[in-house]
Image (cartoon, coloured by chain):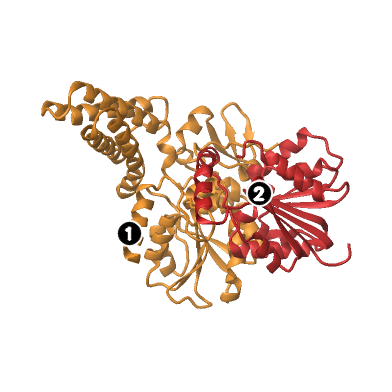
Amino acid sequence: MSGGTIDALWAQMAEQVAKPGACVLDLGCGTGGLTLACASRGAQVTGLDKDAGMLAVARRKAKENSFEEAPEWLELSVMEMEDVLAPESFDAIVSCLAMSELLPEERAYALRQAKVALRPGGVLLLADEAAPEGGGAHLMWRLRRAPRAALTWLLTQQTTHPMQSLGDDVRRADFSDVREERAKEGDFILVRATREGAS
Amino acid sequence: MTGLVDRLSWTRDTLLRLLPHSTRPGLRKVGSPTPDSPILLTCNFTLTVRRMMDTLRGHDVWLLVADSHGINVWCAAGGGHLTHHDVIAVVRSSGIAEKVAHRRLILPQLAATGVERRIVEQRTGFEVKWGPARLEDVVAFLDAGSHMKKRWRRMVFPLWERMEMALMWAAPVALIAGLALWALANARVAWIGAGVLGLTIFAIFAALRWLPVEGAKRALTYVGGALLSTALGAGALSLLGALDAVQVGLLALANAIAMGVLSLDVAGTTPWYPSTLNMTKNHFDLELDADKCTGAADCVMVCPRDVLKMKGKERKVEIARPDACLRCGACVVQCPDDALHFRFTDGRLVPAEQIRKTRMNMLGRRTIETE
């Protein structure tokens, strides 16, 4: 629960990759916020999430809008990507607040599979909550975050797990042109990378 | 030092077991497992993993710990935090397939409300077998060559487990009530209050099988119990001059509030009763479509209450003990023929596919409806 401020981040991400007609995959789409932001720009979007309840909410939200291409929803964990996704079938893969939910070995797998699923020249764009570096700043950030995290947990029994090494993980998965930037006043990290080859 | 830290974390996990406590998911070796050793899977609730490792000591077993968000198997599976996706994820990320020569995976039976066995089998190539419902029977099950016996499918709720559940409630209630009474009165009232409330909860759980846990009258029972225990405990202390009348009144109020809250859904926090909140508001029952049933008996193998039986001659299942049904939905989820479903008293049908997709929230309600 971000109090609505995450909408701007979704829009910012969608603007970068969701060209009309482009095939976009949203990994760990949850209730489909980012998926629908991409769909509303005319992209052909697939949302993947292992939580059937969240997907039900996403489907309902999608129905309330009319898109040229209705999003497709897959109830799968990222560890099942290879079972369903054809290689080189997406122009872009996006993911917001999902990579931090994974164990390091799962994240490595997901990023390797993401590379397989992307077309040459395709773009990977990830956003996740990031803890500020440095002891004092880190403590202040924890305190600032605590009330909202507690409220979120009480209402949804969910929480987020801030991370720092997302860019390195992407590099290890052999993506090229990896760029990192901070977003949302430094609370978020955005990682953009490409799969090598002609587009 | 590690011993001390370990004991402290055990104390924290035990007293605050109402909250999730996660340990790292992944593969654990118990003893010296070989490529032929059995693979057991469990959740990543710290107490469960701890107890599992202790129970299995002396055996050689691969233990896969799936990510259930630090919630126990029964609640995680019912609440959508332990599904086939989590099982597939840990099978793949652990690389267990390269470490063993067989393809058999033993899952806790109580995971059956959330884990669709056939999907795990399709995606991983492992044959899934339901192990005992209770951790206490796992060793006997392994010693029997992983052959399941009927009595290991059945849940029981013995006194020592009721006392564990009592502690789960007593610790946070005593803490909150103690702090409130300390703020309103003084430290002595706080200690007495925490003690009386804690003991009331232990008494209620000890007598749980004789108390009405369902229906509208349950609140009266708990609040009545609260007033009775206050009268007995605080009343006696006030006679000794330890408490004055206002303080006894405060104590009675704290006790009545705590028990009133508990009475909302104590049943739903046990592995033994269906969630009261859910059942009182929208009562539903299990139904069998005998024409669809092919006698696969998946339902019989996952029911923790022995509700379903095979009718030998007809090779069909029957709902033999409907009154014992917890409405956990395990049978509905596992039926390969969609022959089981729930039906509300107003006639609405909840099809199998919806039970598979919807999960229960903290109050035992299946919140999200599919179209």
Pointer 1 local density, CA inside 10 Å: few below 14, some 14–19, many at least 20: few
Amino acid carrying mark 2 in the image: Asp
Which hue belongs to chain A?
red
**Residue under mark 1: which chain is it in?**
B
Quadrant placement of the N terminus of chain B: bottom left
Which hue belongs to chain B?
orange
For the residues labelled 2 and 1, the Cα–Cα distance comes to: 48 Å
In the image, residue B1 above or below residue A126: below
Residue at horizontal 57 percent and vertical 52 percent from the top: A161
Q: Position of residue B338 (x, y in %)?
A: 65, 46
**Residue under mark 2: which chain is it in?**
B
Mark carried by residue B337: 2
Residue tagged by mark 1? Answer: B7
Amino acid carrying mark 1 in the image: Arg
Q: Position of residue B60 (x, y in %)?
A: 44, 73
Judging from the image, what secondary structure is the residue with disc 1 in? helix
In the image, residue A98 above or below residue A175: above
Residue B296 in view here: no
Q: Earlier in the sequence, mark 2 or mark 1?
A: 1
